[in-house]
Image (spheres, rainbow, N blue to C red):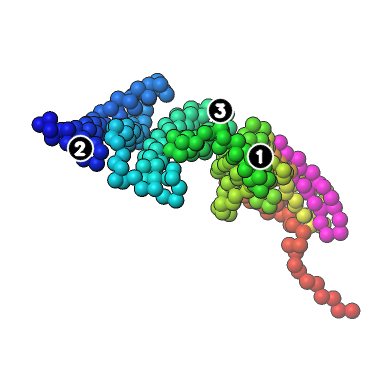
Amino acid sequence: MKEILNYTFLDNTVEAYLYVLGTIVLIFLIKRLVSKFLASKLLGIITKQRSAKRTAFLNLVIKPIEKFLLVFIAYTALDRLYFPNELKIKFFHEHISTEYIVNIIAVTVIVVVFIRLCIRILEFIAQILKEKAIQADDKSDNQLIVFFNDFFKVLLIIIGILLVIKFGFDKNITTVLTGLSIVGAAVALSMRESLENLIASFIIFFDKPFITGDTVKVQNFTGVIEKIGLRSTRIRTEQKTYITVPNKQMVDTIIDNISLRTQRKVELRLEIGLSTLADQLKAVSAAIKNLLQQKNDIESFYVYVMDTGKTAHVVAVDYFTIMPQTINDFNSLREEVNIEVIGLLEKMNIELAGTNTNIVVSNK
């Protein structure tokens, strides 16, 4: 038996192969149990609401933890074996060999699996913070969570690349960062606009000229802010198109935040025929004022004879609606008032200018 275990094949004994194989099989069999245990402990660190969040968290991280455990333990176990001399092949350079390439691939796989696990945990934390932000009165926290979720994802990917460089290629990260700083300066100059958009995104989040869900008018577009990203802001317009505006433009241009208006104003101009008497104009003005007073959605109003001329008497009707108010409710109220004003004019037998189209022909 000892002779079989001590038999050497590809520079390693059968005993060493069995040890590695047994370790991998064992972790393969118990990886689900170990993953659930680690996930439960991790959940306890992240949040105290374990019963409500347990299922969602386990579904999110169980598989990434299993993959990480399997890959990491397999790599650690295989590291006990000597790389066979028969498989050591040099490529192009004396330091580049099959052993070197295999090690890079193994380290890269471990790092990728680990970073994916970290991103899943980050997504779960972001989801918890989103739920808390929704319950809060200040909705700006919601967009801040989305922004920093994307920001930390990018940061994790950068950390993963540095880990591969350090442990896979066995390079000094300090030296690499020094070299990258020089390259980064050149890249920064070529990507100046992208960096300006990134800086503008921080200005938007901390200055808060608008938040996700606000209705804004920017340039020639009016729409709802759906997402504020690292580079651009996405807006769903009134025509239901989806436009992307660079953050720098959102900071530099004049933006009308319709959602922050304290009131919405409606201007109605009634051009009444010149045959209308002064007493009738007073009666029209009083009737319209009485009509507007009965509307709960109207906070204040002005009704007055604005002008008179060769073609018509102009009665100005300006009123301000309550906020917050959706655009559909605003348009419905506006339509309702317009129809009722027309009805008043009909009851009082008052004609609008231009409604009399009788043609009088005289013979001389």
Give the SS element for disc 3. loop
Residues at discs 2 and 3 in contact (Cβ within 8 Å): no
Q: Residue furthest left?
A: 1
| The residue stretch that appears in magenta | 288-317
The mark that comes first in sequence, 1 or 3, is 3
Give the SS element for disc 1. helix
Which of the two residues, 94 or 23, is positioned nearer the viewer here?
94
Q: Nearer the viewer, mark 2 or mark 1?
A: 2
Give the SS element for disc 2. strand
Q: Could you tell me which residue is drawn at 15 percent across and 33 percent down?
A: 5
Residues at discs 2 and 1 in contact (Cβ within 8 Å): no
Label 1 sits on residue: 200
Q: In the image, residue 270 lies at what x, y percent?
A: 75, 52
Q: Is residue 269 above or below residue 104?
A: below
Amino acid tagged 2: Thr
Q: Is residue 307 magenta?
A: yes
Q: Could you tell me which residue is drawn at 81 percent across and 56 percent down?
A: 312
Label 3 sits on residue: 137
Task: Give me the C-alpha separation between circle 2 and circle 1.
Answer: 64 Å
Q: Nearer the viewer, mark 2 or mark 3?
A: 2
Q: Could you tell me which residue is drawn at 60 percent across and 45 percent down?
A: 232
Amino acid tagged 1: Ala
Can you tell which mark lies on residue 8? 2
Which of the two residues, 237 or 105, is positioned nearer the viewer here?
105
User: Would you say 320 lies left or right of 71 here?
Assistant: right
Quadrant into which the C terminus falls: bottom right
Quadrant into which the N terminus falls: top left
User: Would you say 317 lies left or right of 34 here?
Assistant: right
